Image (cartoon, rainbow, N blue to C red):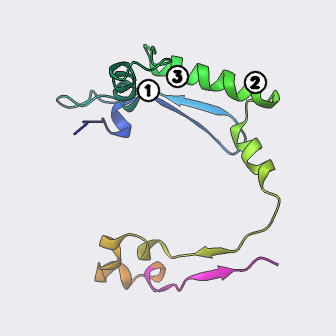
Amino acid sequence: MLAAGTFAETAGTFVNLEGRWQSFAGAAVPVGAARPGWKILRVLGNQLALDGFDYQSAEQVRDELKALAAATDGRTGVAYRAAAAVTTAEALTDVPMYQLDPVLRRAASLQLTRDGQRSARYYGAG
């Protein structure tokens, strides 16, 4: 079992819909033997004698990924490339939030709310 820290215990980066890279630091110290996910993957890579697992910080991982993304097409916006790759419309289904999670689906009090009583909506393509 690999004890990975929670989102609040690790640093990370996400790319928003505008293509901006937004980094954050861990707000708490990991409990017990828990470690950030990138450290767990680094140790596994080193144990398997794989190349490219010599990072010392989450920032090094981010910087390499950012450089690879920029080298792909001259842009740093991963979201931009993902949006540009979509060429056809697809059908979408909007499922009410209290019907997604197995615990919430069984909460009678939540099912009595306006959101809980909404039915799923289907948005068909073309």
Neighbor class of circle 2 (other Cα within 10 Å; few <14, some 14-19, many 20+) is few
Q: For mark 2, what is the residue? A: 71
Disc 3 on helix, strand or loop?
A: helix
Counting from the top left corner in percent of width and height, residue 74 is at 82, 27
Q: Are marks 1 and 3 in contact (CB under 8 Å)?
A: no
C-alpha span from label 1 to label 3: 14 Å
**Is residue 8 part of the magenta span, yes or no?**
no
| Rendered residue at 32%/21% (across/down) | 47
Given the current orientation, which residue lies at the most extreme front position? 49
C-alpha span from label 1 to label 2: 26 Å
Residue in the foreground of this view, choosing between 80 and 18: 80
Bounds of the magenta segment: 116-126
Neighbor class of circle 3 (other Cα within 10 Å; few <14, some 14-19, many 20+) is some
The quadrant in which residue 43 appears is top left
Counting from the top left corner in percent of width and height, residue 90 is at 73, 70
| Rendered residue at 53%/76% (across/down) | 95
> Label for residue 25?
1
